[in-house]
Image: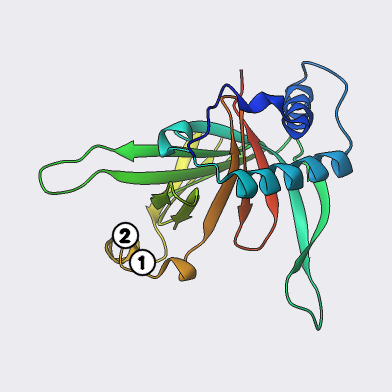
């Protein structure tokens, strides 16, 4: 079932996550406790699985600021992963993720792309690469193959990493199990949430 982005706000977990997003942007001082946000993310993930919700890639396109993440820790002598404590991302290190689509040209099909950027004072790091999205599973596999480093707004390095052009050509033939990925379980007009390959959860917001 494709999710209606305007009808999901009825869940209590969406209310909590929306409040966290609003507070993070400074519109209110009522920031939910990290434990409450972690529980809301877990509820959202469970609801998406139970309701078999799907989200089109178009609903992800744009730039999103990382707001909240959980840590993970492996359980010794047991299978699985246990979530560590969650925390809000310090505003002194703004971190963004972006998604875009490259139009089809001649025999080359349309492609999805991903970008990631983080700012540390006067230093900024940007990564870009190809992505593959499965709407059936809300599953986005990706790989970062380009890197750019800037200092005081001036680019001091820009180049390919992890195989560059060769890596891009091989990306679409690699088994998805070997690639980094995000499994999205909540997408609204103002926020998105996903689990990563390591089992941690993350919340991004669209800045107003």
Give the side of residue 59 with respect to residue 105, left or right.
Answer: right
Task: Determine whether label 2 and label 1 are within 8 Å by CB.
Answer: yes
Image coords of residue 23 (percent x, y): 79, 23
Report which quarter residue 41 is drawn in: top right
Image coords of residue 73 (percent x, y): 79, 67
Q: Secondary structure at mark 2?
A: helix
Q: Return the residue nearer the eye: 77 or 128.
A: 77
For disc 2, the marked residue is 168
Give neighbour class at mark 1: few <14, some 14-19, many 20+ (Cα, 10 Å): few
Q: Residue at x 30, y 67 (%)?
A: 173
For disc 1, the marked residue is 163
Seen as rendered, the residue at the extreme bottom is 77
Compute the Cα span from label 2 to label 1.
8 Å
Q: Residue at x 52, y 33 (%)?
A: 3
Q: Residue at x 55, y 52 (%)?
A: 182
Look at the image and tell me whether residue 139 can be seen: yes
Model colouring = rainbow
Image coords of residue 100 (percent x, y): 39, 37
Q: Secondary structure at mark 1?
A: loop
The tag earlier along the polypeptide, 2 or 1, is: 1
Give neighbour class at mark 2: few <14, some 14-19, many 20+ (Cα, 10 Å): some
Q: Is residue 202 above or below residue 25?
A: below
Q: Residue at x 34, y 61 (%)?
A: 164
Look at the image and tell me whether residue 194 can be seen: no
Q: Is residue 152 above or below residue 202?
A: above
Q: Is residue 70 above or below residue 99?
A: below
């Amino acid at each position: 079932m494709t999710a209606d982005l305007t009808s999901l706000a009825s869940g209590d977990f969406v209310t909590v996550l929306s409040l966290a997003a609003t507070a993070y942007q400074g519109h209110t001082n009522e920031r939910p406790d990290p434990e409450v946000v972690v529980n809301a993310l877990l509820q959202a993930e469970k609801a998406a699985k139970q309701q078999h919700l799907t989200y089109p890639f178009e609903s992800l396109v744009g730039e999103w600021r990382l707001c909240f993440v959980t840590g993970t820790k492996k359980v010794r002598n047991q299978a699985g992963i246990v979530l560590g404590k969650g925390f809000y991302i310090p505003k002194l290190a703004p971190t963004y993720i972006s998604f875009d689509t490259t139009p089809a040209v001649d025999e080359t099909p349309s492609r999805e792309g991903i970008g990631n950027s983080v700012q540390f004072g006067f230093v900024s790091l940007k990564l870009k690469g190809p992505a593959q999205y499965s709407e059936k599973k809300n599953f986005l596999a990706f790989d970062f193959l380009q890197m750019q480093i800037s200092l005081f707004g001036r680019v001091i390095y820009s180049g390919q990493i992890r195989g560059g052009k060769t890596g891009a050509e091989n990306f679409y033939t690699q088994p998805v199990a070997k690639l980094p990925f995000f499994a999205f379980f909540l997408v609204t007009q103002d926020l998105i949430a996903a689990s990563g390959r390591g089992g941690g959860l993350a919340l991004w917001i669209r800045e107003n």
